[in-house]
Image: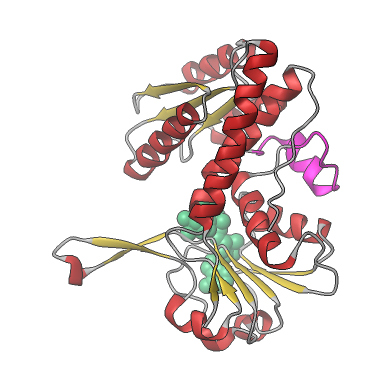
Amino acid sequence: PATVIDGKLQSERVAERVKTLASELNLQTGKKPGLAVVLVGDDAASQVYVGAKTRKAAECGFHSVQHTLPSDTTEDQLAELVDQLNADPTIHGILVQLPLPDGINAPRIIQSISAEKDVDGFHFLNVGMVGVGEFANAFVPCTPAGAMLLIEQIHGRDLSGLNAVVVGRSNIVGKPMANLLIAHNATVTVAHSRTKDLPGTVRQADIVVAAVGRPHLVKGDWLKPGATVIDVGINRVPAPDKGENKFRLVGDVDYAEAAQVAGAITPVPGGVGPMTISLLMANTLVSAYREAGLPKPSFSLDK
Ligand code: NAD
């Protein structure tokens, strides 16, 4: 059976390092890394994510602010808040939680966040730097960055000679994940909804990253024996065994099957999810160090 990659443990290691570096920043400069999280409307999943991010920032010793706006907030009102946060010297990271309510032009709002405070890595400047492999000043999106650290735990930083298959081509996960894998010398295939032979494609992979949003799509017999499986999916499915109207979270990989074939696998929950939040803290910390003119801390995890 596969080695279970403990994303919770690794995310705690990242968060501990963030905490230490935040207190060093504070000793040297009197400043704290500042993270502003903006939530518009009452989407239940978003409320959970935003609460977790705000709490984690406080735990890391950050200046942590949450702006909760009603669902009838106008695009101009939201743009004005982003402008204020862009200009606020105590804020180093701005995160506007997606999805935004209908009627708000989400791309316009996201691109109005200053690239220097875009700790989600969605600004075109950051997307472009990641695309050309110019990582010194780029914010890498948190989920693929976290997934990459987990892959590093198994394979190290140099993936030369390894085939990686990313299932999913979203701008938030699939595409940046493919760029990171290329930067680490993997041979990368990006599969998606129009891929003809998904099982056959996945079977080529030494490393599979599933970022699809389809519960249990990837089956055990799709995997090359010994493959490393990184399951990004978070899907809420009914769990009648837990009671009426109960749900559980499952990934995009059929875990029970895959764990019999894979060499290493991330669980859901407890895999990529917690890494995402810790990498958001790491990006905010890096932003604060940059603003203070200090050298960029690195977040590679040693074995
Ligand atoms: P998305 O909906 O933007 O993209 C899904 C991708 O999957 C698309 O590129 C599509 O082409 C592909 N796809 C859809 N059906 C397919 C199929 N049958 N076969 C092959 N490919 C198919 O989703 P996303 O934002 O990239 O998120 C993907 C999953 O990851 C979701 O479950 C989401 O909840 C989860 N997620 C988790 C985290 C985290 O912190 N762990 C962060 C972001 C997203």
Q: Is residue 111 left or right of residue 100?
A: right
In depth, the one of 163 and 4 nearer the eye is: 4
Q: Is residue 102 visible?
A: no
Closer to the camera in the image, 181 or 26: 26
The residue depicted at 42 percent of the width and 21 percent of the height is 67
Hey, which quadrant is residue 30 in on the image?
Answer: top right
- Image point (69%, 12%), residue name: 29
Magenta span contains residue 58: no
- Residue 49 image point, x, y percent: 42, 41
Instruction: Decide if residue 59 is in sight here.
Output: yes
Eyeballing the image, is 85 above or below 296? above
Q: Is residue 133 left or right of residue 214?
A: right
Count of numbered badges drawn on the protein:
0
Query: Looking at the picture, how far across and down is residue 74, in whole percent?
Result: 44, 21
Q: Residue 69, relative to residue 190: is it above or below?
A: above
Quarter where residue 234 is shown: bottom left
Is 45 positioned to the left or the right of 5 in the image?
A: left
Q: Is residue 183 above or below residue 283?
A: below
Q: Is residue 188 above or below residue 302?
A: below
Q: Quadrant of the C terminus?
A: bottom right
**Percent position of residue 10, x then y:** 56, 52
Residue 126 quadrant: top right
**Span of residues in magenta:** 121-138
Q: Residue at x 70, y 52 (%)?
A: 176
Seen from the viewer's position, the closer of residues 190 and 79 is: 190
